[in-house]
Amino acid sequence: MSPWRALTREDVVRLHCSVLDAPIRDENLLLGALDKPWASFMGVEVYPGLADKTAALLMGLARNHPFMDGNKRTAIGAADLFLAVNGYYLAFESDETVASFVEIVAQGQVEQAFVSAWITAHMKPLNP
């Protein structure tokens, strides 16, 4: 069992509505993106570390487009919220840096390992 706290559907919908009030396009895609970090195969977690789980969540929301609009903004916000409830935050140089990163994630130009590495490089403890 993972020591990390998961985000709920309500957490992500509330976050999304604070960013942009666009309706859910596909409930199943939203739930799939929220379940992705917790996937396992033969009892072994597919995404074992916090950065891996955060990357899976970010990729699921950015690529699956569960909302009518604002999926990339919601994806990075959910990633940051997921880290926050688990004692970390994303530190990045500028809004342009993170926007460019989320764009290449959403377009499928990078793999899970790259996204996990980027998150690892940018996550900092809330209380060092």
Image (cartoon, rainbow, N blue to C red):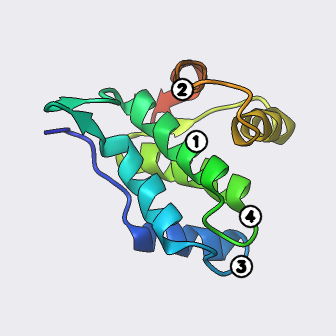
At label 2, the amino acid type is: Gln
Q: Earlier in the sequence, mark 3 or mark 4?
A: 3
Report if residue 6 is visible in the image: yes
> x, y (%) of residue 63?
65, 48
Q: Helix, strand or loop at disc 3?
A: loop
Q: Helix, strand or loop at disc 1?
A: helix
Q: Name the residue under label 1.
A: 59
- Is the residue under label 4 in contact with that under label 3 (CB below 8 Å)? yes
At label 4, the amino acid type is: Gly
Q: Is residue 12 left or right of residue 61?
A: left
Q: Name the residue under label 2.
A: 112
Task: Please tell me the numbered disc located at residue 83.
Answer: none
| Residue 23 placement: quadrant | bottom right
Q: Earlier in the sequence, mark 2 or mark 1?
A: 1
Q: Which residue is drawn at 71% across and 79% down?
A: 22
Q: Name the residue under label 4.
A: 70
- Is the residue under label 1 in contact with that under label 2 (CB below 8 Å)? yes
Q: In this view, does 119 lie to the left or right of 22?
A: left
- Is the residue under label 4 in contact with that under label 1 (CB below 8 Å)? no
- Is the residue under label 2 in contact with that under label 4 (CB below 8 Å)? no
At label 3, the amino acid type is: Ala
**Which mark's residue is nearer the viewer, 4 or 2?**
2
Task: Please tell me the numbered disc located at residue 22.
Answer: 3
Residue 97, placed above or below residue 58:
above
Q: Camera-side residue: 19 or 87?
A: 19
Q: Helix, strand or loop at disc 4?
A: loop
**Which mark's residue is nearer the viewer, 2 or 3?**
2
Mark 3 Cα-neighbour bin, 10 Å: few <14, some 14–19, many ≥20: some
At label 1, the amino acid type is: Met
Q: In this view, does 37 lie to the left or right of 60?
A: left
Q: Is residue 3 left or right of residue 71?
A: left
Q: Which of marks 2 and 3 is nearer the N terminus?
A: 3
